[in-house]
Image (cartoon, grey):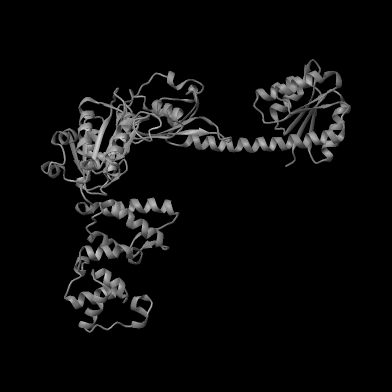
């Protein structure tokens, strides 16, 4: 379609000249000699560009310009002016005119200005198209989306924010902190933290305590807003209403995940219930379990699901530091306290004030550190190394160990009074071998994780790998399973992980426990079991040996012993002759 131009001027010669030059260049031109006629045309037609004379029979081109702006029309307006009205032209530019053309009109100037105005309009149209598309997406999202500037003034809200947070587009421009809080105010606090720290905040499934929706449970995330120049301009808040999902989980009496803890077994349901009951209790918690069972994840869940989530969660591995370094790490030091102390340094307890500190491998700390930790738990005070001034803190303490602390107490290696201070509540995490019904759920979780990490599309594990995993006792627990699958992802270039991809793991598997092929559902005597395994693996002796839980040489002896013949021996043996 031809681009459409309106020329408004009370001089017929000017209208004629514009129309002649512009039509020759392929534009469609409409003319008007008066203000009223021009505004009627603008009301009833769409124009891509308007030329308007400054002086119009009692009105002015600036009145035309204001009319276009009042109607929010995306149409550039170029003023036509004589030399005496240059000041008026400058005023028109200030009010939003695209440009002005002086009389007498030069053809070359007219066409250059027209081209520039059309290019400008095309860019503005494209920008508006993207803006409208983004706004449509923004308004259609079912999660509440709220953006604020650095002073906590509302920039934008979507429709869902009305239902979830009682915020509407009418509140845009007002300070979010000034609104009456009909809820616990956690969203505002999360936004304030993001603006202060310029870092994201996530609070997973908490009760809003909303006045009008008392049972509402939401998950919120906040992120800093960075403009195209890399400057921090505010924050965005996303509120997801999880009320229905939580209700369904309670009805099913089975949760598959709590925070980042995975599992649906009865033992894990008990763990979830204990964690839920402890999130807002200040008591110390001792998490007990073998290495790799997820003790650190329990600390995460206790912190991020409770009232302390907006403060720091500080983690310390007590076994990784010497006694003196651990004391400095926990309590800090002042300048000159020891060689290398070149400045004052806060300890982890001070950093965690108002939040949570997680002390992993608590069973490894010395008697001296046990005494100092006991004092912190009893009095909630400590001194930095080299300083006599006491520092008071409010810290929730979560500790963990894979050791039997009662045995250490009997050997005189751990203080009994500290033990009972630490285990006001004890949470025992089951090993993976005692909750095998969770294994495949964990496998699916790690498949999703590693598909994203390695940009692959692995769909699952083979039946044989599944049987091997279910038959293994997993001394390294969930961490060992994760590491095994990560290795398999690295070497697997197919959609399914097979026994070939866990060859490094099979060595541990066969040494750990010589499972017979009966573990995989085979029946019959030894000869029948060997034949069955060979048939399942198409004669591949290495894979068949893995299934049988024996070495390749042992399988060779049994084949020879039972006089088993393998067809296509040259092709099948080990897949490579």
Camera-side residue: 402 or 203? 402
Report whether residue 378 is seen. Answer: yes
Question: Left or right: where does residue 257 sit relative to residue 27?
Answer: left
Q: Residue furthest left?
A: 410
Tell me if residue 433 comes above or below residue 506 in the rendering. Answer: above
Camera-side residue: 411 or 175? 411
Q: Measuring 25% from the left and 36% from the top, which residue is drawn there? A: 398
Could you tell me which quadrant the C terminus lies in?
Answer: bottom left
Camera-side residue: 61 or 113? 113
Report whether residue 301 is seen. Answer: no
Could you tell me which quadrant the N terminus lies in?
Answer: top right
Question: Left or right: where does residue 169 sit relative to residue 434?
Answer: right
Camera-side residue: 501 or 71? 501
Horizontal and vertical percent position of residue 267: 19, 46
Tell me if residue 503 comes above or below residue 113 in the rendering. Answer: below
Q: Residue furthest top?
A: 58
Q: How many marks?
A: 0
Q: Measuring 13% from the left and 36% from the top, which residue is drawn there? A: 416
Question: Left or right: where does residue 7 sit relative to residue 529?
Answer: right
Horizontal and vertical percent position of residue 533: 26, 73
Horizontal and vertical percent position of residue 128: 61, 35
Horizontal and vertical percent position of residue 429: 21, 45
Q: Measuring 46% from the left and 28% from the top, which residue is drawn there? A: 195
């Amino acid at each position: 379609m031809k681009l459409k131009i309106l020329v408004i001027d009370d001089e017929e010669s000017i209208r004629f000249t514009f129309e002649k030059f512009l039509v020759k260049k392929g534009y469609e031109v409409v003319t008007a000699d008066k203000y009223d006629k021009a505004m009627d045309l603008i009301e009833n037609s769409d124009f891509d560009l308007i030329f308007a004379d400054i002086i119009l029979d009692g009105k002015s081109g600036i009145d035309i310009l204001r009319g276009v702006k009042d109607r929010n029309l995306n149409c550039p307006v170029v003023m036509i002016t004589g030399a005496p009205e240059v000041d008026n032209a400058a005023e028109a530019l200030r009010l939003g005119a695209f440009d002005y053309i002086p009389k007498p009109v030069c053809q070359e100037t007219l066409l250059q200005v027209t081209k520039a105005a059309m290019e400008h309009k095309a860019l503005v149209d494209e920008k508006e198209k993207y803006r409208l598309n983004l706004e449509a997406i923004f308004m259609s999202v079912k999660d509440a989306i709220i953006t604020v500037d650095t002073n906590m003034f509302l920039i934008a809200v979507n429709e869902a924010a009305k239902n979830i947070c009682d915020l509407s587009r009418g509140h845009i421009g007002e300070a979010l902190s000034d609104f009456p809080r009909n809820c616990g105010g956690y969203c505002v606090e999360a936004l304030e933290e993001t603006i202060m720290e310029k870092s994201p905040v996530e609070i997973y499934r908490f009760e809003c305590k909303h006045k009008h929706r008392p049972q509402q449970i939401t998950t919120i995330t906040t992120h800093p807003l960075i403009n195209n120049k890399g400057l921090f301009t505010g924050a965005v808040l996303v509120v997801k209403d999880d009320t229905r999902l939580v209700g369904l989980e309670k009805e099913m009496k089975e949760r598959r995940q709590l925070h980042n803890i995975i599992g649906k077994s009865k033992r894990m349901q008990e763990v979830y219930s204990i964690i839920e009951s402890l999130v807002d209790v200040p008591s110390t918690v001792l998490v007990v379990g073998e290495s790799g069972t997820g003790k650190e994840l329990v600390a995460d869940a206790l912190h991020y699901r409770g009232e302390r989530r907006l403060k720091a969660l500080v983690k310390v591995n007590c076994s990784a530091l010497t006694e003196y370094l651990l004391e400095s790490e926990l309590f800090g030091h002042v300048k000159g306290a020891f060689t290398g102390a070149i400045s004052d340094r806060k300890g982890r307890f001070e950093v965690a004030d108002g939040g949570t500190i997680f002390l992993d491998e608590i069973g490894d700390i010395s008697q001296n550190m046990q005494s100092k930790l006991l004092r912190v738990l009893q009095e909630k005070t400590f001194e930095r190394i080299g300083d006599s001034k006491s520092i008071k803190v409010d810290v929730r303490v979560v500790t963990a160990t894979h050791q039997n602390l009662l045995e250490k107490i009997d050997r005189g290696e751990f203080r009994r009074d500290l033990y009972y201070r630490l285990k006001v509540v004890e949470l025992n995490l089951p090993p993976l071998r005692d909750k095998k019904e969770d294994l495949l759920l964990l496998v699916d979780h790690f498949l999703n994780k590693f598909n994203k990490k390695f940009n692959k599309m692995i769909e699952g594990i083979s039946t044989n790998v599944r049987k091997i995993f279910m038959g293994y006792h997993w001394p390294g627990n969930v961490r060992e399973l994760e590491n095994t699958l990560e290795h398999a992802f690295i070497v697997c270039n197919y959609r399914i992980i097979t026994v070939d991809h866990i060859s490094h793991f099979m060595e541990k598997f066969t040494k750990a426990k010589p499972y017979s092929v009966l573990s995989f559902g085979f029946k019959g005597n030894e000869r029948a079991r060997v034949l069955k395994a060979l048939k399942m693996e198409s004669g591949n002796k290495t894979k068949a040996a893995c299934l049988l839980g024996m070495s390749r040489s042992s399988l060779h002896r049994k084949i020879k012993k039972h006089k088993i013949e393998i067809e296509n021996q040259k092709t099948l043996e080990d897949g490579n002759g």
